[in-house]
Image (cartoon, helix red, strand yellow):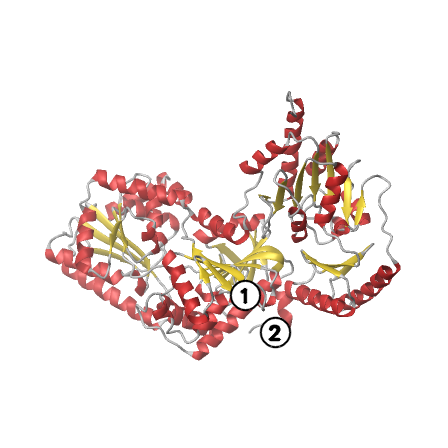
Amino acid sequence: MHAPESERDELYVDHVYDMIVVSNRLPVDYREGPDGTTQWNSSPGGLVTALEPVMRAADGAWIGWAGVADREFPPFEHDGISIIPVPLSADELEDYYEGFSNDTLWPLYHDVIAPPSFHREWWEAYVRVNRRFAEAAARAASDGAVVWVQDYQLQLVPRMLRESRPDLVIGFFNHIPFPAYGIYSQLPWRRQVIDGLLGADVIGFQRAADAGNFSRAVRRLFGYSTHGTIIDVPDDGGDPRRVVARHFPISIDTAGFEELARRADVQERAQEIRESLGNPETIMLGVDRLDYTKGIRHRIKAFGELLRDGRLKVEDVTLVQVASPSRERVETYRQLRDEIELAVGRLNGDYSTLEHQAIAYLHHGYPREEMVALYLAADVMLVTALRDGMNLVAKEYVACRFDDDGVLLLSEFTGASDELRQAVLVNPHDIEGLKDAIVEATRMPKRERSRRMRALRKRVRDNDVAHWSASFLETLTGAGIIKPGVSDPLQAAINRMAGTERLLVALDFDGTLAPLVDRPEDARATDRARAAIERLGAADDTRVAIVSGRALESLGQVASPPEGTLLSGSHGVELQLDPAGVTIDLRESETAKLERLSSIVEEIASGADGAWIEHKPAGLALHTRRLTGNAGTALQHAARNRVEAELLGITVRTGKSVLEFAVRSSDKGESLTRLRQHVGATAVMYVGDDVTDEDAFATLDAEDVGVKVGQGKSIATYRVRSPEDVADLLERLADARDAAREAPSRWP
């Protein structure tokens, strides 16, 4: 049974996150311990490997189903990643997952190799479950967070998120093909699915052809304008929202597979496998989920005919077929298993000898070490899929062949064939052509094998899974995966500006100098950052300013700024340019407006446990960080509507889990301009993490440097990952400034 919707806020999340991955399954598998305790084991895969670094850097969470029906699990931490399970009932598993996802969408998106089924109750379950995933993501997402939705089971989530949380940056990646319109148009809910996907800012596909199919479907169904990879989506009567739809071919953890392949115990296991098969001249290998799209029947048919015709001999060639179980509750898959096992039995009965088996058929999965040993043992890898979004097995085989040997025989109908052009490419529907290609692969000279494999390995190394995720996130946010430390381009920028005559270093506080905390009064700058600020500010040619949305009094208390540091509070309404400070004298009308503003917001916040108000000289801030995502968003929405309806001339600004109101307008951009003029700066470095810092970045000139901290869209040229990296940046700037002062002829 599910908890009522009213109870689920507490069930799902007690924290909000800047980066969220949403997928049908979590990156962990549930297991009940011998004493009845809940245990979680990592389910390593390319997606997890790619996203772990960015999720840790950006305070990320992973939302998905735990793999157990009719069970509720609270959020938990696993290997440094926050996990938020979403529950599914047994009925939903049958209708949403086995039904609509895998008996409607899967066959339809794979060119109707098997006929899809269309049932209204399946669609209704699909909508219901997608909404549950979207609501979980909306609750867990901080203001302006990046949400990356994965795969065909959740195609409605982007639009649902866009409607409830327009502040979010939303990406979607489709791991399977997207069909041509003539096939896609069979789907009764074709408009709803396309509209669901168009809620994303970036929609990723495996192949350029898939992205083209999607854009053509958008034009046919909605008539929206498309320009290359850009789709203009009307947005509530305003300017069209630009959606990117393009290919981002997924890959694997290349280095991880090669590292396993180089292990002595794995190589020994590969030799054991060859010996157990009778040491044939050639071992051919197929590794697939037991799925009708994989072309397993076609390769078995081709192999059988080669044995029948004497072009291959069972004493010389053995086929190892690993067919891991898949969706065995779906009738189509049960039938496929029966057909494959019948074909294997007949072929072995006809051609195997006591010493040599024609086909070693293995209907179960294996741990990664065993798979790598199989790849090393195999002389020829057979990938004969009839339709496949990518096929990572082909890339895994190539990654493991550090010996530059082995032959990859690859279907033209896989996404991998677009990249791995040095494979032996085949049309698996052409049985005669497939047979010729198999013979060619078994007889290929060593020199030719090595030439092809070297080219394949370079391609897989240069385009690994980290490159895939960084490319997608860079398109989505402008950042990609932000590595720790200071990047080479940012170091070069530091070196360029180090010799400027008069430098202003302006820094946001919360999330930039100080890590974000639940209680703002507990925030403190890191020791390294404070020491670097003291070094920078000690010289006459450099001034440091802290630019914050906090009231000046609060900023002075938490920042404990070194002597000589300039302060800007309340988004520039308050400026302290000397120890005497600056006072704000509000006009009588502004004072009255501030009193009414406080009354309205206090009344609204009083009914929300966890919300609190920060009073400022010219306004106030409604903080919702302690509320769940949906509750915080709803409270901010109510406060904004009420204030705008009852008071004129109020400036409203949204930040990270905070809504700010001011009776006197200013922003960090105006503040930075005034600070620049006060200092007489010839160059400015500005560092900030919030959406409110974008106003400051917008004022920077060509010789200035803007640095965004963390994920999220930004016009800043450079990025760092965290406050610790800000400290590193300031230390490097202080070092470069010292070196520039010591250099002769510093200025012309």
Query: The residue tagged with tag 1: helix, strand or loop?
Result: strand
The label number, if any, that marks residue 9 in the structure image: none
Q: x%, y% of residue 102?
A: 39, 69
Q: Is residue 121 above or below residue 665?
A: below
User: Looking at the image, which residue is at 19% across and 45% down?
Assistant: 281
Say what amino acid the circle numbered 1 marks: Val
Q: Is residue 640 above or below residue 265?
A: below
Q: Is residue 410 above or below residue 236?
A: above
Residue indicated by mark 1: 86
Q: Does residue 638 appear in this view? A: yes
The label number, if any, that marks residue 4 in the structure image: 2
Say what amino acid the circle numbered 2 marks: Pro
User: Looking at the image, which residue is at 64% across and 42% down?
Assistant: 701
Query: The residue tagged with tag 2: helix, strand or loop?
Result: loop
Q: x%, y% of residue 206?
A: 40, 56
Q: Nearer the viewer, residue 539 or 683?
A: 683
